[in-house]
Amino acid sequence: MMVIQELKPSKHVEGRWLAVLEDGSILRMGESEVVSFALYAGKELSEEEALQLQTAAHHSGLKSKAIELLMRRPQSRRELERKLAEWDASAEEAEAICGRMEELGYLNEAEYAGRIVRHYAAKGFGERKLRDELYRRGIPRALWEEALAQIEDEDNAEAIDAFLEKKLKGSHEPRDIKRASDALARRGFSWPEISDALRRYGMEVYD
């Protein structure tokens, strides 16, 4: 048997309760566990009940941490699953928690994909870089095109033109042009996009 010596709400996290056990260990759980296990100070738990409570408390803690993480910074499902694994969640727990986060609206990969695309496009990166970021973050490919459609071609042209003006500052030296072109390519812009921008800049370009 194990006795709950003290049961009290957390001073730091709203909705969390602390159960101090006779061995000095502390179980952190949500209010639902307090209610479903009918907990109170002085209650005796059998070995089976204690194990069930520990399992439920662990699962509840994982859900709370997942919500806190998603409220701070959006994630893809794969990123959240990876984080849950770091928190010692089983594959089944991670899958269940991710599903619950989707139901509650905390995990929304389509919205996250749009944020990623808008963020990097605003920094002046091209489509290839945007696709690299979507891939790196584990966003399903089925969501890529819809997210990328939010970025108009005109925006790419404006971003490239602004980049060339900033980097070249009026220079038409071949060496400077090559450096700027290489930098644009590293940012994910295609050669047709770059060559069109160089023509607008006043350079004679042969495709």
Image: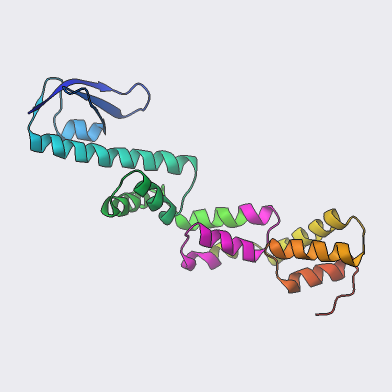
| Above or below for 6 versus 197 | above
Name the outermost residue toward the bottom.
207
Closest to the observer, 187 or 11? 187
Which residue is rendered at x = 38% and y = 43% of the image?
A: 66
Residue at x-position 63% and y-position 62%: 129
On the rendered structure, is 154 left or right of 67?
A: right
At 70% from the left edge and 70% from the top edge, which residue is drawn? 190
Q: Is residue 198 above or below residue 61?
A: below
Residue sitting at x 26%, y 42% = 59
Q: Is residue 70 magenta?
A: no
Which secondary structure dominates the residues rendered in magenta? helix
Q: Give above or below for 176 relative to 16.
A: below
Q: Pick the residue in front: 167 or 41.
A: 167
Image quarter where the N terminus lies is top left
Question: In this picture, which residue range is highlighted in magenta?
Answer: 119-145
* Count of number-bearing discs: 0
Residue 206, percent from left and from top: 84, 79
Which colouring convention does the figure follow? rainbow
In this picture, residue 62 sits left or right of residue 3: right
Is residue 126 inside the magenta stretch?
Answer: yes
150 or 10: nearer the viewer: 10
Q: Quadrant of the C terminus?
A: bottom right
Looking at this view, is 111 or 159 the one in front? 159
Q: Position of residue 134 (x, y in %)?
A: 54, 60
